[in-house]
Image (spheres, rainbow, N blue to C red):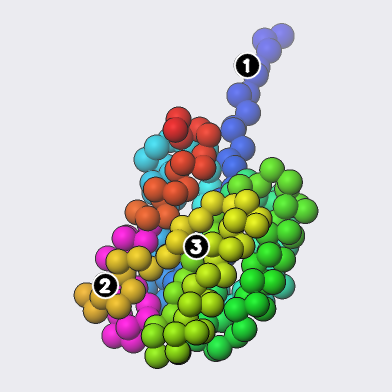
């Protein structure tokens, strides 16, 4: 009796989860125009074994992220977590101390599920009209958590995009498709350096 050739098992893809708000979700755009989908294209172009999961929810805060991080990671957890939350905290005037506690809690829950997870925190900044004291305290939260929790840091998710009318929708808050592309390029520059398979 002829034996069937052994099936070569498909390589299970590792998971990159983007925990974010409306910017990650691609508010006002098609989902495939949001930067997590663009990151997937960059991953595929490099031939890297990763699946990018867009866990962006419009209107979400760091408190919301803390509540849903276990759900977002799923039973298998993730190999890489991008935390892109905080903008709505600032717009709602949430205490920077509370935002810091929530971000720290998200990191702790992610590591409880996978102690070797790699984490990238994307910082946010607030407009000057919220007052210099709050603006500076808020901005300082993200590098502080990154340092204390030993994560990677993208200092400002909207660097070169925020405040540029050409790169934002009429609400001046949410990036256009071109703005999303700029964000994807910035995030990818950090993310690629975190992936051992990328041959850095």
Residue range (magenta): 167-184
Q: Residues within 10 Å of mark 1 (few under 14, many from 20)?
A: few
Proximity of marks 2 and 1: CB atoms separated by less than 8 Å: no
Q: Residue at x 55, y 66 (%)?
A: 142
Spot the residue most to the top. Answer: 1
- Which quarter shows the C terminus? top left
**97 or 12, nearer to the observer:** 97
Gap between marks 2 and 1 measured at Cα: 54 Å
Mark 2 element type: helix
Q: Position of residue 159 (x, y in %)?
A: 35, 65
Residue 189 visible here: yes
Q: Could one spot residue 33 in this view of the protein? A: no
Is the N terminus in the top left, top right, bottom left or bottom right quadrant?
Answer: top right
Query: Residue shown at 68%/12% (left/top)?
Result: 3
Is residue 174 rendered to the left or right of residue 154?
A: left
Query: Which residue was labeled with disc 1?
Result: 5
Q: Secondary structure at mark 3?
A: strand
Please report contact status of discs 3 and 1: CB closer than 8 Å, yes or no.
Answer: no
Residue, far left: 166
Q: Nearer the viewer, residue 188 or 55?
A: 188
Helix, strand or loop at mark 1: loop
Dot label at residue 167: 2
Circle 3 sits on which residue? 122
């Amino acid at each position: 009796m002829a034996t069937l050739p052994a099936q070569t098992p498909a390589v299970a893809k590792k998971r990159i989860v983007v925990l974010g708000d409306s910017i990650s979700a691609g508010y006002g755009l098609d989902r495939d125009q949001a930067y997590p989908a663009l990151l997937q294209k960059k991953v595929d172009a490099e031939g890297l074994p990763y699946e990018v999961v867009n866990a962006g929810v419009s209107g979400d805060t760091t408190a919301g992220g803390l509540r849903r991080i276990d759900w977002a990671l799923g039973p298998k957890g993730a190999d890489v977590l991008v935390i892109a939350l905080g903008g709505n905290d600032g717009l709602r005037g949430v205490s920077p101390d509370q935002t810091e506690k929530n971000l720290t809690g998200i990191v702790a829950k992610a590591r409880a599920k996978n102690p070797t997870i790699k984490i990238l925190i994307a910082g946010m900044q607030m407009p000057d009209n919220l007052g210099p004291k709050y603006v500076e305290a808020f901005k300082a939260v993200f590098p502080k958590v990154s340092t204390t929790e030993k994560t990677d840091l993208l200092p400002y998710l909207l660097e070169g995009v925020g405040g540029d009318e050409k790169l934002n929708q009429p609400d001046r808050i949410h990036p256009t498709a071109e703005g999303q592309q700029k964000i994807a390029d910035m995030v990818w520059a950090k993310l690629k350096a975190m992936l051992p398979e990328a041959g850095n």
